[in-house]
Amino acid sequence: MSKRDYYEVLSVAKDASERDIKKAYKRLAMKLHPDRNEGDKAKEEQFKEVKEAYEILNDDQKRAAYDQYGHAAFEQGGHGGGGGFGGGQDFGDAFGDIFGDIFGGGGRRGGGQSRQRRGSDLRYNLDLSLEEAVKGKTLEIKVPTFVSCDPCDGSGAKKGTSAKTCSTCHGHGQVQMRQGLFAVQQTCPTCSGKGKVISSPCTSCRGQGRVEKTKTLSVKIPPGVDTGDRIRLSGEGEAGEHGAPAGDLYVQANVKEHKIFVRDENHLYCEVPISFTTAALGGDIEVPTLEGKVKLKIPKETQTGKMFRLRGKGVKSVRSHSTGDLMCKVVIETPVSLSGDQADLLRQLEEKMGKSTSKHSPKETGFFDGVKKFFDDLKS
């Protein structure tokens, strides 16, 4: 079956510009791509035809050969020497080219040119106090990284010169070797896949287009961040080689342990010691919050471990903006270093309460009554 004219396939004129060819290819590829037409064999064949036409007409040398010899230029033994284009790029690669061109991604450029590699993303672990994490703060950090070389403006070529198209791969970054019926593509050994060769490299960066440097950056920490939260600084990662875009920097928060508070999401927890007199008779005490001290009323006969909730005294969420609570757990402290008189007063108190143990210490009485019943049941 004879092939259709490539210009007809893309619906462009024979004198169409590279931009018009690329525009036509994108439109048709978006419409015919197999991912959008699952199971439609006819559209899959059309997509292959469009892709083949684009690969020929978007390459100056291949287009010139096609204009002179037609399809015969690319048949086995013809002037093109390439042996067809069906296996050079799969559906995913072709679709990647489309979105790479539209959104500035890392897809290959028209004509099979080399891939411009974006710089690496970086992560910076930032230790924060609980106060800094809760209230937010602007901090300066120092990040060792690669930055674009100033003398060559990131090109890698000495000032006043420029990189030249590789004579081995003609700027494609890949070369094709034929063995019988099979064609194998491999990275160009001359330019290492870059498509360009720098004959006079920049002395500052030695042709890399970037140099090592420690950058000082200002980072705004929003109120309410917690351990594991990340702040993205776009374009502050490593600079790419030979003028490629820089990656991003991710500042990851790590909130250090606090001497008083323990954080659980938006709630704060703390233990507050009270005397057994305050626990028995009740009274007002002062408890700490991140905003200062507040009064807490302790009712009489409070037991150790009792939890009191102070609403709105926790952490304001960085996402929902709701504020958590402060949970205060009271712990009754046993007095120490008693004088003789003080010890005698405690003994007198114990003697006076001794006859009414169940009334004054119901938990203690209930516990030992249960123990007694347990052993009585074992004997029976």
Image: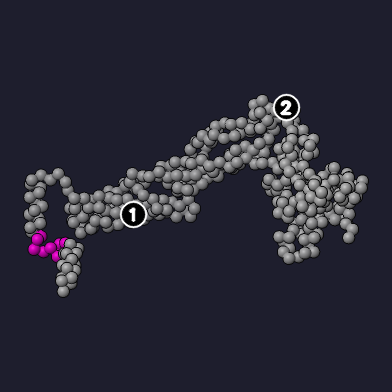
Q: Number of callouts in the render?
A: 2
Q: Position of residue 355 (x, y in %)?
A: 8, 63
Identify the residue at horizontal 51%, vertical 46% (top origin): 230
Q: Residues within 10 Å of mark 2 (few under 14, many from 20)?
A: some
Instruction: Say whether residue 366 is left or right of residue 197.
Output: left
Please identify the residue farthest to the bottom as the structure is shown. Answer: 380
Residue type at mark 2 is Ser
For residue 328, above or below residue 379: above
Q: Which residue is mark 1?
A: 327
Q: Secondary structure at mark 2?
A: loop
* Residue 362 visible, this angle: no
Instruction: Say whether residue 130 is left or right of residue 369.
Output: right
Identify the residue at horizontal 72%, vertical 64% (top origin): 38
Mark before the other along the chain sequence, 2 or 1 = 2
For residue 26, above or below residue 196: below
Q: Which residues are magenta?
A: 353-361
Q: Position of residue 79 (x, y in %)?
A: 88, 45
Q: Secondary structure at mark 1?
A: strand
Q: Are marks 2 and 1 in contact (CB under 8 Å)?
A: no
The image quarter in which residue 165 lies: top right
Q: Which residue is mark 2?
A: 200
Q: Residues within 10 Å of mark 1 (few under 14, many from 20)?
A: many
Q: Which quadrant: the N terminus? A: bottom right
Q: Which quadrant: the C terminus? A: bottom left
